[in-house]
Image (spheres, coloured by chain):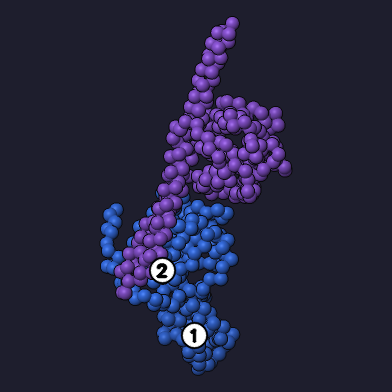
């Protein structure tokens, strides 16, 4: 009898491990798909600082060729080149991190930092679609024990979805609102848009796998996002926004609750 | 198309440090780009060849600014938050701001560039910018604007002079332009030939015309037709 239980437990553990691996694999595929959708705007995010580098280098040569050379101006141009090169490198590093197939790696994560990093990847997409972003990140938030890349993936997904919803409205009020706060049950992150919103009857269906409203989408983004948040002991859900649009919220336990 | 990258000093005569030519003389470039890296780099680059530069992150900032009254041009990013570059071009076409536009874009979007060129843009350049192309376009834009401003000033002068004519002189002016001889004008206006000749010389003097052809050109630029009134 006891042996049987042990065997069953081993089998269950194995099944669970398999499932986790599958989930991680799916999360990775979904992440890469999202990055694929962002290719154009990410290329833009890299090419802007590179354009700065080229023109600053041209300027620098002029200052050096002046009689006498203007070393001060040349130095400032070089400093800009360094700054812009770093800016481009950062984008590349962030994309590479998201694209990598990492084993789950939980650390103490600062959610605001994660939000800001993610936003920097989506900036091009927001500008391109004329979406104005408002952020309200609370100070001194407790950290969360989480996989940073997976959290970025969830946030990126919510932002891209909101951005897409916003492109469906044409009256010029494309507003995206992102906020973080500490509540009793944990950290809350809110992504609110003023798009057309979600049909109340569909508000749960959007989290189902293969549910999609876009021709190019796989319909996995929100399903994967929810499973990621749930694997972090949290919840992800949608609500209607007033007067129009959708609100996506997730809540995950922070070091305050786990202590 | 080959673009030779020559040493800077050969392309633009090196200027001595700190010399800042007047805005009117050198012209001014307005940069509108939402990216701070691009903005700062272009501002410095155009500044390094002796141009005056003002830069803005949005179209609104540009419109709200106090701009010097000088020959200039706009280096305009196609994609901007709020009013886009193309929208701004259309806006300008309908306003009294006549600045020539050089578009810059992160993508070589052909459809957009065709649209921009049709609306009279001077150039459509793709980032990263080739310095020589940018400088050529900017200098061409400033030169064109300078010519337009001179022409506008000349025309203002002619208009002012036209205002100084008496009603009778104005009448004589129009008939002279129409190619009538003094004798005919005298008959038409029931004046003596001598009086017409006096009016006529007043017209020439007041308008500052050196010859009849000169006067005809002025009339033409004012849109007064040299029609045959018979």
The residue under the point 46% across, 86% down is: B208
Q: Pinpoint the chain carrying mark 1.
A: B
Residue highlighted by disc 1? B207
Q: The blue chain is which one?
A: B
Residue sitting at x 56%, y 71% = B66
Element under label 2?
helix
Q: Which residue lies furthest to the right in this view?
A: A243
Answer yes or no: is residue A165 visible. no
Quarter of the image where one finds residue A84? bottom left
Vertical comparison of A189 with B126: above or below: above
Q: Residue at x 57, y 36 (%)?
A: A145
Label 2, label 1: how many angstroms apart (C-alpha)? 42 Å
| Residue named by callout 2 | B47
**Residue B67 position within the rendered picture, expressed as x and y whole percent measured from the top left:** 53, 71
Q: The purple chain is which one?
A: A
Task: Establish if A30 lies above or below B37.
Answer: above
Residue extending furthest toward the top:
A1
**Picture coordinates of residue A56 (x, y %)?**
39, 60
Q: Which of marks 2 and 1 is nearer the N terminus?
A: 2
Residue A53 or residue A257, whichever sits in front: A257
Q: Which of marks 2 and 1 is in front?
A: 2
Q: Nearer the viewer, residue A82 or B109?
A: A82
| SS assignment at label 1 | helix
Q: Could you say which is closer to the camera, residue B137 or residue A5? A: A5
Vertical order, B76 against B156 (above or below): above
Query: Which of the image's four quarters has the N terminus of chain A?
Result: top right
> With A59 as the anchor, is B95 left or right in this view?
right
């Amino acid at each position: 009898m006891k042996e049987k239980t042990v065997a069953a437990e081993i089998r269950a553990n194995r099944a669970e491990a398999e499932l986790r691996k599958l989930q991680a694999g799916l999360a990775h595929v979904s992440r890469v798909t999202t990055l694929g959708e962002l290719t154009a705007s990410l290329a833009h995010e890299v090419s802007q600082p590179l354009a700065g580098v080229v023109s600053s280098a041209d300027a620098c040569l002029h200052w050096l060729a002046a009689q006498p050379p203007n070393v001060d101006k040349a130095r400032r141009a070089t400093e800009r080149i360094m700054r812009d090169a770093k800016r481009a490198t950062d984008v590349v590093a962030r994309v590479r991190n998201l694209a990598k197939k990492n084993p789950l790696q939980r650390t103490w994560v600062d959610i605001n930092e994660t939000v800001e990093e993610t936003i920097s990847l989506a900036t091009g997409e927001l500008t391109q679609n004329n979406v104005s972003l408002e952020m309200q990140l609370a100070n001194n938030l407790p950290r969360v024990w989480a996989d940073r890349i997976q959290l970025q993936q969830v946030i990126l997904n919510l932002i891209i979805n909101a951005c897409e919803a916003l492109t469906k409205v044409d009256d010029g009020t494309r507003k995206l609102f992102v906020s973080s706060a500490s509540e009793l049950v944990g950290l809350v992150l809110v992504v609110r848009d003023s798009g057309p919103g979600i049909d109340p009857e569909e508000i749960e269906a959007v989290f189902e796998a293969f549910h999609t409203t876009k021709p190019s989408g796989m319909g996995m983004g929100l399903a994967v996002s929810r499973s990621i948040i749930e694997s972090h002991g949290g919840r992800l859900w949608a609500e209607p926004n007033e007067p129009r649009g959708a609100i996506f919220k997730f809540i995950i336990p922070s070091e305050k609750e786990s202590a | 198309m080959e673009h030779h990258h020559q040493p800077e000093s050969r392309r633009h005569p090196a200027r001595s440090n700190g010399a800042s030519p007047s805005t009117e003389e050198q012209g001014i470039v307005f940069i509108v780009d939402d990216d701070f890296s691009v903005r700062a780099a272009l501002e410095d680059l155009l500044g390094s060849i002796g141009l005056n530069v003002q830069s803005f992150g949005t179209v609104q900032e540009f419109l709200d600014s106090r701009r010097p009254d000088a020959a200039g041009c706009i280096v305009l990013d196609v994609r901007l938050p709020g009013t886009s570059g193309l929208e701004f071009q259309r806006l300008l076409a309908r306003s009294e701001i006549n600045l020539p536009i050089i578009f810059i874009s992160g993508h070589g979007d052909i459809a957009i560039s065709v649209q921009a060129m049709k609306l009279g843009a001077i150039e459509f350049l793709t980032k990263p910018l080739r310095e020589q192309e940018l400088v050529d376009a900017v200098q061409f834009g400033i030169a064109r604007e300078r010519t337009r401003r001179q022409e506008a000033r000349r025309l203002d002068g002619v208009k002012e002079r036209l205002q100084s004519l008496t009603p009778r002189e104005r009448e004589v002016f129009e008939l002279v332009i129409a190619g009538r001889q003094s004798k005919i004008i005298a008959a038409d206006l029931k004046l003596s030939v001598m009086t017409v000749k006096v009016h006529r010389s007043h017209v020439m003097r007041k308008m500052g015309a050196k010859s009849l052809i000169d006067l005809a050109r002025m009339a033409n630029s004012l849109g007064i037709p040299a029609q045959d009134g018979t």
